[in-house]
Image (spheres, rainbow, N blue to C red):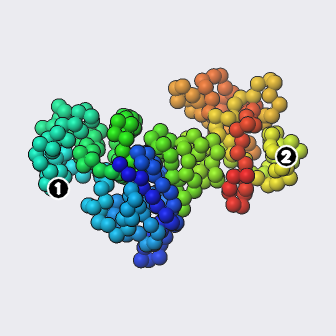
Amino acid sequence: MAKVQLENVRKVYENGQVAVQGATFEVADGELMVLVGPSGCGKSTLLRMIAGLEDITSGTLRIGDKVVNDVAPKDRDIAMVFQSYALYPHMTVRENLAFGLKLRGHPQAVIDERVRNAAQLLGLSDMLDKLPKAMSGGQRQRVALGRAMVRESAVFLLDEPLSNLDAKLRHSVRTEIAQLHRKLGTTMVYVTHDQVEAMTLGQRIVVLNAGVIQQIDTPMALYERPANLFVAGFLGSPAMNVLRGTLQDGGLRMADGRQVPLAAPQELQGREVLVGIRPEHLQPAATSDTVAFEGKVEGIEPVGNEIFVNLTLGEQMLVMRVPPQALPPVGGALKVALHGAHLHFFDPQSELRL
């Protein structure tokens, strides 16, 4: 196992496009770190630079205590799992798992033991003689994971390994990856665009946008104290609601003159702000609630254990997440309470947290 350190790592392509801008962070020995962000944000480029598949324009990359900027991928002691399973279709599971070890000249006894251990850990023991075409997508992805495992490398790199699976399989394999990390204790860097994967898998998360790191923290710290509006909107489903206006007279005065009562820090009074509210922190108002406003119900989406209520407040769309309950019909009015302790305030110009 080994830690991975990036110091001001940049990637600029020949056409001048900046893919990664000054990335600095450390993946601790044995940590599962997730890189997350929208398509084109630079997360896969970062992973490929760690793997040695992309040249680093500037900055320093260390694996363990060794600078590896100019070290070939095969000499970096890394194992990589790709989005596509990349299995050899004419080889059995056993042969796929063993192939890389044979190329490196390991003794047959060592190969057999590592293949047996990986197969047992991943639940593949009774599939070793199957060809990939006879397996499900989830089973193939487990073979791809096993092929990385048998290498016994210092660092595992996973590039969107679940994106080809359906929702049920994604949940199942995600659980298996988390269990695998706990058992192996290997340093892992995991890339995904799926914020649910990031929140459930990562011990820490690096949030990227347009090649720039926005925030690095634990999943719940990112959710509860996002550093800026991008992080606030990207993590969480449905996304955070955002209201724009000026804090005055005990509430938020919006552009249309509508007043939304809410509690805000005294030092922000008189300022134009963006107010972020998670859907679960909007609730139907009780009689005793004084910090409330009236919205119009535009849609009701029951999903079993909860209901998403789409509301309008003037021209502003809001989403509320509530437990199953009786609600006004679509087109009706609903008085909504704000949970003041859970409000987030951002600067409208910089979009940074206030």
Q: Which mark is residue 11?
A: none
Residue positioned 68% across, 56% down in the render: 352
Percent across and percent down for residue 249 are 89, 44
Residue position marked by numbered label 1 in the rendering: 104
Q: Amino acid at mark 1?
A: Arg
Question: Would you place residue 230 above or below residue 169 in this image?
Answer: below
Marks counted in the figure total: 2
Residue positioned 39% across, 65% down in the render: 67
Q: Is residue 250 visible?
A: yes
Q: Quadrant of residue 340?
A: top right
Residue positioned 44% across, 77% down in the render: 15
Residue position marked by numbered label 2 in the rendering: 266
Residue positioned 45% across, 49% down in the render: 28
Percent across and percent down for residue 26 are 48, 55
Q: Nearer the viewer, residue 183 or 39?
A: 183
What kind of element bears circle 2? helix
First in residue order: circle 2 vs circle 1: 1
Left or right? Give the position of 324 relative to 84.
right
Please identify, in this view, whether the residue under mark 2 or under mark 1 is nearer the observer.
1
Q: Nearer the viewer, residue 139 or 124?
A: 124
Circle 1 packing at 10 Å, graded few (<14), some (14-19), many (20+), is: few
Q: Quadrant of residue 127?
A: top left
Q: Amino acid at mark 2?
A: Gln
